[in-house]
Image: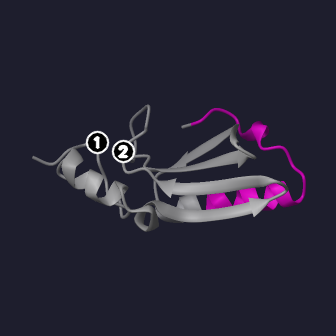
Amino acid sequence: MISDVYYDRDGNPIESGVEWGKYHVDPEYKRVASSYVAGKHISTVWVGMNMAFRNGPPIIFETMVFSEDADDGFMQRYATEEEALLGHLEVLRRLKVGESLMEEGPDV
């Protein structure tokens, strides 16, 4: 039985949490992009679990920003790897020019 919870990086359903776990322990598979700017670490990863709170495509990627050793409070989620990479680049651009990230509005 195919799960509606777990997905690979291409958005294809993964049959079980066990199969998902095989991918999830591989840091190279999980990492979409990682950047440092203005003392902050921008991390965009494949999570592989559907984090959508409503109908629509599965939300399986996430960007977070960290300062020093703390979560900066910014998080944005995406359905596709392309959206995730574009989102990562936009966060990087905004931080480079000193724009606030907290104006993004509610999370998905």
Assign the magenta stretch its main secondary structure.
helix
Point 44% across, 62% down: residue: 27
Examine the rendered structure and indicate whether residue 89 appears above or below residue 103.
below
Side of 50 relative to 100 (left or right): left
Q: Where is residue 73 shown, x and y percent of the image? A: 69, 35
Estimate the spatial distance between the alpha carbons at disc 2 and disc 1, rounded to whole Å.
Answer: 5 Å
Horizontally, residue 93 falls left or right of residue 66, namely: right
Residue at the spot of label 1: 5
Q: Is residue 20 visible?
A: yes
Residue at the (81%, 55%) spot, across then down: 94
Q: How many marks?
A: 2
Can you give x and y, in whole percent of width and height, for residue 21 in the image?
A: 28, 51
Lateral position of residue 15 relative to residue 72, left or right: left
Q: Quadrant of residue 11?
A: bottom left
Residue visible at 27% across and 52% down? 20
Mark 2 crowdedness (10 Å alpha carbons): few <14, some 14-19, many ≥20: some
Residue lying at 60% horizontally and 45% vertically, measured from the top left: 76
- Residue 37 vs 59, above or below: the answer is below
Would residue 13 be visible to someone looking at this image?
no
Q: In x, y percent, where is residue 55?
A: 38, 36
Secondary element type, mark 2: loop
Question: What's the magenta region?
Answer: 86-107
Crowding at dot 1, Cα within 10 Å, few <14 / some 14-19 / many 20+, comes out as some
Marks 2 and 1 in Cβ contact (< 8 Å):
yes
Asked which secondary structure carries label 1, the reply is loop
Marks 2 and 1, the one that precedes in the sequence: 1
Q: Amino acid at mark 1?
A: Val
Q: Amino acid at mark 2?
A: Met
The tag on residue 49 is 2
